[in-house]
Amino acid sequence: MTPDDLREVEEQQALILARVAERPLVESATVPVPAALGRTLRAPLRALVDIPVFDNSGMDGFAVRFEDVADAAPGRPARLRVVADLPAGTSLDPALAPGEAARIMTGSPVPSAADAVVPFEDTAGGLGDSLSEIAVERAPRAVGAHIRRRAEDSAAGDALLPAGVELGALQLAAAAAAAVFEVVVSRHPRVAVVSTGSELVPPGSPLERGQIPESNSQLLAGLVAQAGAEVVLRTSVPDNGDGPLRAVAEATALGADVVVFSGGVSAGAYEPVKMMLAASMEFTKIRMQPGKPQGFGVTDAGVLLFGLPGNPVSAAVSFEVFVRPALLALQGRSQLHRPLLRLPAASAWRTPPGRRQYLPAAIDRSDPGRWTVRPATGGGSGSHLAGGLARAEAYAVVGADVDAVAAGDLVDVMLIS
Protein backbone atom coordinates (compact mmCIF):
# COMPACT_ATOMS: atom_id res chain seq x y z
CA MET A 1 0.00 0.00 0.00
CA THR A 2 1.12 3.58 -0.58
CA PRO A 3 1.78 5.99 2.31
CA ASP A 4 -1.64 7.61 1.92
CA ASP A 5 -3.26 4.14 2.04
CA LEU A 6 -4.34 4.11 -1.62
CA ARG A 7 -3.47 1.19 -3.86
CA GLU A 8 -2.60 1.81 -7.50
CA VAL A 9 -5.08 0.60 -10.12
CA GLU A 10 -2.49 -1.63 -11.82
CA GLU A 11 -1.57 -3.27 -8.51
CA GLN A 12 -5.18 -4.22 -7.84
CA GLN A 13 -5.59 -5.49 -11.41
CA ALA A 14 -2.45 -7.62 -11.10
CA LEU A 15 -3.63 -9.07 -7.79
CA ILE A 16 -7.00 -10.03 -9.30
CA LEU A 17 -5.55 -11.51 -12.48
CA ALA A 18 -3.03 -13.54 -10.48
CA ARG A 19 -5.89 -15.16 -8.57
CA VAL A 20 -7.81 -15.74 -11.82
CA ALA A 21 -4.75 -17.46 -13.30
CA GLU A 22 -4.89 -19.97 -10.44
CA ARG A 23 -8.37 -21.13 -11.50
CA PRO A 24 -8.91 -20.69 -15.26
CA LEU A 25 -11.96 -22.23 -16.84
CA VAL A 26 -10.62 -25.51 -18.18
CA GLU A 27 -13.87 -26.55 -19.82
CA SER A 28 -14.30 -25.93 -23.53
CA ALA A 29 -17.01 -26.79 -25.99
CA THR A 30 -17.14 -27.60 -29.68
CA VAL A 31 -20.04 -25.68 -31.18
CA PRO A 32 -21.36 -25.04 -34.70
CA VAL A 33 -20.05 -21.86 -36.25
CA PRO A 34 -23.48 -20.11 -36.17
CA ALA A 35 -23.64 -20.68 -32.39
CA ALA A 36 -20.18 -19.25 -31.70
CA LEU A 37 -20.95 -15.54 -32.03
CA GLY A 38 -19.39 -13.66 -29.12
CA ARG A 39 -17.55 -16.71 -27.79
CA THR A 40 -13.81 -16.91 -27.16
CA LEU A 41 -11.82 -19.16 -29.50
CA ARG A 42 -10.05 -21.83 -27.46
CA ALA A 43 -8.00 -23.52 -30.21
CA PRO A 44 -6.49 -21.99 -33.38
CA LEU A 45 -8.90 -21.78 -36.30
CA ARG A 46 -7.42 -23.49 -39.36
CA ALA A 47 -8.73 -23.39 -42.91
CA LEU A 48 -10.11 -26.65 -44.26
CA VAL A 49 -10.01 -25.49 -47.89
CA ASP A 50 -8.11 -22.92 -49.92
CA ILE A 51 -9.50 -19.39 -50.12
CA PRO A 52 -10.33 -18.94 -52.98
CA VAL A 53 -11.04 -22.61 -53.59
CA PHE A 54 -10.10 -22.30 -57.29
CA ASP A 55 -8.94 -19.69 -59.80
CA ASN A 56 -12.04 -17.60 -60.51
CA SER A 57 -13.06 -14.50 -62.35
CA GLY A 58 -13.10 -11.17 -60.56
CA MET A 59 -15.29 -9.56 -63.23
CA ASP A 60 -18.21 -10.27 -65.54
CA GLY A 61 -16.68 -10.55 -69.02
CA PHE A 62 -14.63 -12.97 -71.08
CA ALA A 63 -11.92 -15.47 -70.23
CA VAL A 64 -9.20 -15.09 -72.85
CA ARG A 65 -5.67 -16.01 -73.81
CA PHE A 66 -3.65 -12.88 -73.07
CA GLU A 67 -1.58 -13.18 -76.24
CA ASP A 68 -4.79 -12.92 -78.31
CA VAL A 69 -5.70 -9.50 -76.87
CA ALA A 70 -2.37 -7.99 -75.81
CA ASP A 71 -2.41 -5.45 -78.67
CA ALA A 72 -6.11 -4.57 -78.54
CA ALA A 73 -6.93 -0.86 -78.55
CA PRO A 74 -9.77 1.45 -79.68
CA GLY A 75 -9.68 1.49 -83.49
CA ARG A 76 -7.90 -1.84 -83.73
CA PRO A 77 -9.90 -4.31 -81.65
CA ALA A 78 -8.99 -7.95 -81.18
CA ARG A 79 -11.81 -10.14 -82.49
CA LEU A 80 -12.51 -13.44 -80.73
CA ARG A 81 -15.09 -16.18 -81.14
CA VAL A 82 -17.08 -17.08 -77.99
CA VAL A 83 -17.12 -20.87 -77.61
CA ALA A 84 -18.47 -21.35 -74.06
CA ASP A 85 -20.66 -19.72 -71.42
CA LEU A 86 -19.55 -20.05 -67.77
CA PRO A 87 -22.06 -18.99 -65.08
CA ALA A 88 -21.13 -19.10 -61.40
CA GLY A 89 -21.22 -22.67 -60.11
CA THR A 90 -20.34 -24.31 -63.42
CA SER A 91 -17.95 -27.24 -63.50
CA LEU A 92 -17.03 -26.76 -67.17
CA ASP A 93 -13.40 -26.27 -68.20
CA PRO A 94 -13.59 -25.55 -71.93
CA ALA A 95 -10.55 -25.65 -74.16
CA LEU A 96 -9.69 -22.32 -75.85
CA ALA A 97 -7.89 -22.38 -79.17
CA PRO A 98 -6.14 -19.25 -80.46
CA GLY A 99 -8.73 -16.59 -81.21
CA GLU A 100 -11.36 -18.07 -78.87
CA ALA A 101 -12.90 -16.84 -75.62
CA ALA A 102 -15.46 -17.95 -73.02
CA ARG A 103 -18.12 -15.67 -71.54
CA ILE A 104 -17.60 -15.78 -67.79
CA MET A 105 -19.38 -14.38 -64.73
CA THR A 106 -17.84 -13.16 -61.49
CA GLY A 107 -16.84 -16.09 -59.28
CA SER A 108 -16.91 -18.66 -62.10
CA PRO A 109 -13.93 -21.02 -62.52
CA VAL A 110 -11.43 -19.68 -65.04
CA PRO A 111 -10.70 -22.15 -67.87
CA SER A 112 -7.29 -23.77 -67.62
CA ALA A 113 -6.47 -22.44 -71.09
CA ALA A 114 -7.20 -18.80 -70.14
CA ASP A 115 -4.77 -16.46 -68.43
CA ALA A 116 -6.74 -13.19 -68.28
CA VAL A 117 -10.28 -11.84 -68.09
CA VAL A 118 -11.60 -8.97 -70.21
CA PRO A 119 -14.52 -7.11 -68.55
CA PHE A 120 -17.66 -6.52 -70.64
CA GLU A 121 -17.00 -2.75 -70.56
CA ASP A 122 -13.71 -3.26 -72.42
CA THR A 123 -15.48 -4.76 -75.43
CA ALA A 124 -17.50 -3.09 -78.19
CA GLY A 125 -20.76 -4.92 -77.58
CA GLY A 126 -20.59 -5.65 -73.86
CA LEU A 127 -23.15 -8.04 -72.37
CA GLY A 128 -25.64 -7.33 -75.16
CA ASP A 129 -23.40 -8.94 -77.78
CA SER A 130 -21.51 -11.59 -75.89
CA LEU A 131 -22.31 -15.05 -77.25
CA SER A 132 -20.97 -14.94 -80.79
CA GLU A 133 -18.00 -12.81 -81.83
CA ILE A 134 -16.61 -10.07 -79.60
CA ALA A 135 -14.38 -7.09 -80.26
CA VAL A 136 -11.94 -6.38 -77.43
CA GLU A 137 -11.08 -2.66 -77.49
CA ARG A 138 -8.84 -2.44 -74.41
CA ALA A 139 -6.16 -4.98 -73.56
CA PRO A 140 -5.91 -6.36 -70.02
CA ARG A 141 -3.09 -4.78 -68.04
CA ALA A 142 -1.12 -8.05 -67.77
CA VAL A 143 -1.31 -11.82 -67.68
CA GLY A 144 -3.58 -12.75 -64.80
CA ALA A 145 -5.71 -9.60 -64.98
CA HIS A 146 -9.04 -9.96 -63.13
CA ILE A 147 -8.27 -13.53 -62.07
CA ARG A 148 -8.52 -14.32 -58.36
CA ARG A 149 -5.95 -17.04 -57.80
CA ARG A 150 -6.53 -20.16 -55.74
CA ALA A 151 -5.26 -19.85 -52.15
CA GLU A 152 -4.14 -16.23 -52.62
CA ASP A 153 -5.87 -15.40 -49.32
CA SER A 154 -5.08 -18.56 -47.38
CA ALA A 155 -4.34 -22.22 -48.02
CA ALA A 156 -5.88 -25.28 -46.42
CA GLY A 157 -4.20 -25.83 -43.06
CA ASP A 158 -3.30 -22.17 -42.53
CA ALA A 159 -4.17 -20.66 -39.15
CA LEU A 160 -6.83 -18.02 -39.78
CA LEU A 161 -7.13 -16.99 -36.11
CA PRO A 162 -5.15 -17.76 -32.96
CA ALA A 163 -6.74 -18.97 -29.75
CA GLY A 164 -7.91 -16.22 -27.42
CA VAL A 165 -9.82 -13.97 -29.82
CA GLU A 166 -13.48 -13.08 -29.66
CA LEU A 167 -15.49 -14.55 -32.51
CA GLY A 168 -17.49 -11.79 -34.15
CA ALA A 169 -19.41 -11.75 -37.41
CA LEU A 170 -16.31 -11.17 -39.54
CA GLN A 171 -14.34 -13.96 -37.88
CA LEU A 172 -17.18 -16.44 -38.26
CA ALA A 173 -17.65 -15.49 -41.91
CA ALA A 174 -13.97 -16.27 -42.48
CA ALA A 175 -14.44 -19.63 -40.79
CA ALA A 176 -17.39 -20.46 -43.02
CA ALA A 177 -15.46 -19.39 -46.13
CA ALA A 178 -12.72 -21.81 -45.10
CA ALA A 179 -15.33 -24.63 -44.84
CA VAL A 180 -15.02 -24.72 -41.04
CA PHE A 181 -18.35 -25.87 -39.61
CA GLU A 182 -17.55 -26.02 -35.89
CA VAL A 183 -15.09 -24.33 -33.53
CA VAL A 184 -13.68 -24.94 -30.05
CA VAL A 185 -14.67 -22.18 -27.65
CA SER A 186 -14.41 -21.43 -23.94
CA ARG A 187 -17.32 -22.00 -21.60
CA HIS A 188 -19.24 -18.91 -20.56
CA PRO A 189 -18.19 -17.86 -17.04
CA ARG A 190 -21.20 -18.08 -14.72
CA VAL A 191 -21.81 -14.93 -12.72
CA ALA A 192 -24.10 -13.92 -9.86
CA VAL A 193 -25.02 -10.23 -9.58
CA VAL A 194 -26.07 -9.02 -6.12
CA SER A 195 -27.18 -5.48 -5.27
CA THR A 196 -27.13 -4.45 -1.61
CA GLY A 197 -29.15 -1.72 0.08
CA SER A 198 -32.34 -1.45 2.11
CA GLU A 199 -33.31 1.59 0.06
CA LEU A 200 -33.61 -0.41 -3.19
CA VAL A 201 -36.97 -1.35 -4.71
CA PRO A 202 -37.76 -2.84 -8.13
CA PRO A 203 -38.20 -0.28 -10.93
CA GLY A 204 -41.88 0.59 -11.31
CA SER A 205 -42.71 0.05 -7.65
CA PRO A 206 -44.18 2.97 -5.68
CA LEU A 207 -41.38 4.91 -3.99
CA GLU A 208 -41.63 5.78 -0.33
CA ARG A 209 -39.41 8.36 1.29
CA GLY A 210 -35.80 7.17 1.25
CA GLN A 211 -36.32 4.57 -1.47
CA ILE A 212 -34.83 4.49 -4.98
CA PRO A 213 -35.29 2.21 -8.00
CA GLU A 214 -32.73 -0.60 -8.04
CA SER A 215 -30.68 -0.27 -11.23
CA ASN A 216 -27.24 -1.71 -10.51
CA SER A 217 -28.28 -5.30 -11.16
CA GLN A 218 -29.56 -4.28 -14.60
CA LEU A 219 -26.30 -2.42 -15.24
CA LEU A 220 -24.04 -5.23 -14.09
CA ALA A 221 -26.04 -8.02 -15.72
CA GLY A 222 -25.76 -6.21 -19.04
CA LEU A 223 -22.02 -5.65 -18.62
CA VAL A 224 -21.55 -9.30 -17.67
CA ALA A 225 -23.31 -10.41 -20.86
CA GLN A 226 -21.25 -8.02 -22.97
CA ALA A 227 -18.11 -9.59 -21.50
CA GLY A 228 -19.14 -13.01 -22.77
CA ALA A 229 -20.36 -14.35 -19.42
CA GLU A 230 -23.69 -15.76 -18.27
CA VAL A 231 -25.78 -14.40 -15.39
CA VAL A 232 -27.02 -17.31 -13.27
CA LEU A 233 -28.37 -15.24 -10.36
CA ARG A 234 -29.58 -11.66 -10.10
CA THR A 235 -30.83 -10.55 -6.73
CA SER A 236 -30.94 -7.76 -4.16
CA VAL A 237 -30.33 -7.99 -0.40
CA PRO A 238 -30.96 -5.48 2.42
CA ASP A 239 -28.31 -3.88 4.58
CA ASN A 240 -29.28 -5.93 7.62
CA GLY A 241 -29.09 -9.67 8.01
CA ASP A 242 -26.91 -12.26 6.31
CA GLY A 243 -28.04 -11.57 2.74
CA PRO A 244 -24.51 -11.55 1.23
CA LEU A 245 -23.67 -14.93 2.80
CA ARG A 246 -26.90 -16.46 1.54
CA ALA A 247 -26.31 -14.99 -1.92
CA VAL A 248 -22.83 -16.54 -2.09
CA ALA A 249 -24.22 -19.90 -0.97
CA GLU A 250 -26.96 -19.77 -3.61
CA ALA A 251 -24.52 -18.70 -6.30
CA THR A 252 -22.16 -21.54 -5.39
CA ALA A 253 -25.02 -24.03 -5.59
CA LEU A 254 -25.83 -22.71 -9.07
CA GLY A 255 -22.25 -23.31 -10.20
CA ALA A 256 -21.24 -19.64 -10.32
CA ASP A 257 -17.60 -18.83 -11.01
CA VAL A 258 -17.94 -15.20 -9.94
CA VAL A 259 -20.14 -13.15 -7.60
CA VAL A 260 -20.30 -9.39 -8.16
CA PHE A 261 -21.70 -7.28 -5.32
CA SER A 262 -22.59 -3.62 -5.65
CA GLY A 263 -22.72 -1.59 -2.45
CA GLY A 264 -21.83 -2.58 1.08
CA VAL A 265 -18.06 -2.17 0.71
CA SER A 266 -17.38 1.37 1.93
CA ALA A 267 -16.80 2.93 5.36
CA GLY A 268 -20.39 3.44 6.54
CA ALA A 269 -22.14 1.89 9.52
CA TYR A 270 -24.21 -0.46 7.33
CA GLU A 271 -21.88 -2.27 4.94
CA PRO A 272 -23.21 -5.84 4.69
CA VAL A 273 -20.66 -7.22 2.23
CA LYS A 274 -17.79 -5.89 4.30
CA MET A 275 -19.28 -7.23 7.54
CA MET A 276 -20.43 -10.64 6.31
CA LEU A 277 -17.55 -11.58 3.98
CA ALA A 278 -14.50 -10.21 5.77
CA ALA A 279 -13.07 -13.73 6.08
CA SER A 280 -13.07 -14.25 2.29
CA MET A 281 -12.46 -10.76 0.90
CA GLU A 282 -9.91 -7.98 1.21
CA PHE A 283 -11.34 -4.47 1.26
CA THR A 284 -9.08 -1.65 0.15
CA LYS A 285 -8.97 1.84 -1.33
CA ILE A 286 -7.77 2.41 -4.88
CA ARG A 287 -6.21 5.56 -6.29
CA MET A 288 -9.10 6.23 -8.66
CA GLN A 289 -12.28 8.26 -8.90
CA PRO A 290 -14.97 7.04 -8.94
CA GLY A 291 -14.46 3.59 -7.48
CA LYS A 292 -12.07 4.13 -4.56
CA PRO A 293 -13.53 1.45 -2.23
CA GLN A 294 -13.06 -2.05 -3.61
CA GLY A 295 -13.40 -5.58 -2.33
CA PHE A 296 -12.00 -8.77 -3.81
CA GLY A 297 -11.51 -12.32 -2.64
CA VAL A 298 -12.02 -16.00 -3.28
CA THR A 299 -14.19 -18.45 -1.37
CA ASP A 300 -12.97 -21.85 -0.20
CA ALA A 301 -14.92 -23.29 -3.13
CA GLY A 302 -12.94 -21.13 -5.57
CA VAL A 303 -15.65 -18.60 -6.40
CA LEU A 304 -14.25 -15.13 -7.19
CA LEU A 305 -15.89 -12.36 -5.15
CA PHE A 306 -15.95 -8.73 -6.28
CA GLY A 307 -17.24 -5.94 -4.05
CA LEU A 308 -17.97 -2.77 -6.04
CA PRO A 309 -19.20 0.59 -4.73
CA GLY A 310 -22.96 1.08 -4.83
CA ASN A 311 -23.21 4.35 -6.71
CA PRO A 312 -24.02 3.49 -10.34
CA VAL A 313 -21.13 5.31 -12.02
CA SER A 314 -18.72 3.83 -9.49
CA ALA A 315 -20.11 0.36 -10.15
CA ALA A 316 -19.85 0.79 -13.92
CA VAL A 317 -16.27 2.08 -13.80
CA SER A 318 -15.20 -0.58 -11.30
CA PHE A 319 -16.65 -3.32 -13.47
CA GLU A 320 -14.78 -1.99 -16.49
CA VAL A 321 -11.46 -1.67 -14.67
CA PHE A 322 -11.47 -4.83 -12.55
CA VAL A 323 -14.28 -7.30 -13.31
CA ARG A 324 -14.32 -7.26 -17.10
CA PRO A 325 -10.60 -8.14 -17.43
CA ALA A 326 -11.10 -11.00 -14.98
CA LEU A 327 -14.06 -12.40 -16.94
CA LEU A 328 -12.07 -12.21 -20.18
CA ALA A 329 -9.07 -13.87 -18.54
CA LEU A 330 -11.28 -16.71 -17.32
CA GLN A 331 -12.22 -17.34 -20.96
CA GLY A 332 -8.61 -17.28 -22.12
CA ARG A 333 -9.01 -14.04 -24.04
CA SER A 334 -5.68 -12.70 -25.32
CA GLN A 335 -6.69 -9.02 -25.08
CA LEU A 336 -7.94 -8.15 -21.58
CA HIS A 337 -8.02 -4.37 -21.64
CA ARG A 338 -9.63 -1.96 -24.06
CA PRO A 339 -7.24 0.10 -26.20
CA LEU A 340 -6.97 3.82 -25.52
CA LEU A 341 -7.38 6.67 -27.99
CA ARG A 342 -5.90 10.09 -27.36
CA LEU A 343 -8.34 12.89 -28.16
CA PRO A 344 -8.47 16.62 -27.45
CA ALA A 345 -10.92 17.74 -24.77
CA ALA A 346 -13.85 19.75 -26.13
CA SER A 347 -14.23 21.63 -22.83
CA ALA A 348 -12.53 22.04 -19.49
CA TRP A 349 -13.33 19.93 -16.43
CA ARG A 350 -12.10 19.36 -12.91
CA THR A 351 -10.13 16.31 -11.80
CA PRO A 352 -9.85 14.75 -8.31
CA PRO A 353 -6.59 15.54 -6.49
CA GLY A 354 -4.18 12.62 -6.44
CA ARG A 355 -6.50 10.06 -8.03
CA ARG A 356 -6.87 8.72 -11.56
CA GLN A 357 -10.15 9.91 -13.01
CA TYR A 358 -12.49 7.76 -15.11
CA LEU A 359 -14.97 10.28 -16.48
CA PRO A 360 -18.08 9.08 -18.35
CA ALA A 361 -17.66 10.81 -21.67
CA ALA A 362 -19.21 11.42 -25.06
CA ILE A 363 -17.31 11.69 -28.35
CA ASP A 364 -17.99 14.48 -30.84
CA ARG A 365 -17.45 12.93 -34.30
CA SER A 366 -18.87 15.82 -36.33
CA ASP A 367 -15.40 16.52 -37.75
CA PRO A 368 -14.05 13.16 -39.01
CA GLY A 369 -10.52 14.53 -38.90
CA ARG A 370 -10.69 15.74 -35.34
CA TRP A 371 -12.78 13.87 -32.81
CA THR A 372 -13.09 15.50 -29.41
CA VAL A 373 -14.18 14.25 -26.00
CA ARG A 374 -16.38 15.91 -23.39
CA PRO A 375 -18.12 14.90 -20.13
CA ALA A 376 -21.32 12.94 -20.70
CA THR A 377 -23.16 15.03 -18.09
CA GLY A 378 -23.04 18.57 -16.83
CA GLY A 379 -22.37 17.21 -13.37
CA GLY A 380 -18.95 15.87 -14.28
CA SER A 381 -17.91 12.54 -12.77
CA GLY A 382 -20.32 12.42 -9.83
CA SER A 383 -20.73 8.74 -8.95
CA HIS A 384 -24.48 9.10 -8.40
CA LEU A 385 -25.27 10.44 -11.90
CA ALA A 386 -26.93 7.30 -13.24
CA GLY A 387 -28.82 9.16 -15.96
CA GLY A 388 -25.60 10.40 -17.53
CA LEU A 389 -24.44 6.84 -18.09
CA ALA A 390 -27.03 6.59 -20.86
CA ARG A 391 -25.07 9.20 -22.82
CA ALA A 392 -21.62 7.79 -22.08
CA GLU A 393 -19.84 5.97 -24.86
CA ALA A 394 -16.37 6.17 -23.35
CA TYR A 395 -14.38 6.93 -20.23
CA ALA A 396 -11.89 9.77 -20.31
CA VAL A 397 -8.95 8.51 -18.26
CA VAL A 398 -6.98 11.30 -16.60
CA GLY A 399 -3.84 10.60 -14.59
CA ALA A 400 -3.58 11.25 -10.86
CA ASP A 401 -0.85 13.83 -11.51
CA VAL A 402 -3.15 16.06 -13.60
CA ASP A 403 -4.74 18.94 -11.68
CA ALA A 404 -7.33 19.90 -14.30
CA VAL A 405 -8.20 19.34 -17.95
CA ALA A 406 -8.35 22.39 -20.21
CA ALA A 407 -10.10 22.60 -23.57
CA GLY A 408 -7.73 21.27 -26.21
CA ASP A 409 -5.70 19.08 -23.83
CA LEU A 410 -5.05 15.59 -25.15
CA VAL A 411 -6.81 12.99 -23.02
CA ASP A 412 -6.70 9.18 -22.99
CA VAL A 413 -10.11 7.81 -23.98
CA MET A 414 -11.40 4.26 -23.50
CA LEU A 415 -14.26 3.54 -25.91
CA ILE A 416 -16.90 1.27 -24.36
CA SER A 417 -19.56 1.27 -27.09
Image: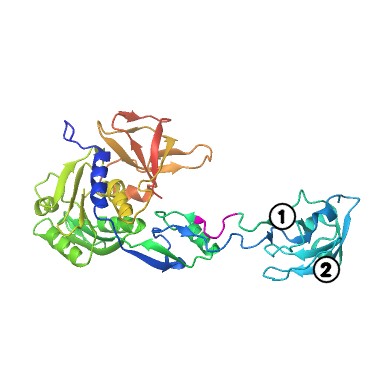
Q: Quadrant of residue 356?
A: top left
Q: Tag 2: residue type?
A: Val
Task: Determine whether 94 is above or below 64 in the image.
Answer: below
**Counting residues from the N terminus, which is met first, the one under dot 2 or under dot 1?**
2
Q: Position of residue 393 (x, y in %)?
A: 39, 47
Nearer-the-camera pick, 392 or 16? 16
Q: Is residue 158 magenta?
A: yes
Q: Position of residue 25 (x, y in %)?
A: 29, 59
At x 43%, y 30%, the residue is 408
At x 35%, y 48%, the residue is 336
**Pointer 2: what residue?**
83
Residue closest to the far front: 157
Element carrying mark 1: loop
Query: Could you tell me if the residues under marks 2 and 1 are in contact, i.e. CB atoms within 8 Å?
Result: no
Nearer-the-camera pick, 339 or 49? 49
Task: Determine whether 211 is above or below 31 in the image.
Answer: above
Residue closest to the far right: 75
Q: Quadrant of residue 166?
A: bottom left
At label 2, counting other C-alpha atoms closer than 10 Å, the crowd grade (few under 14, some 14-19, many 20 or more) is some
In the rendered structure, which segment of residues is drawn in magenta?
153-159
The reply to whether residue 380 is in sight is no
Element carrying mark 2: strand
**Pointer 1: what residue?**
146
Q: Main secondary structure of the magenta part?
A: loop
Nearer-the-camera pick, 144 or 177? 144
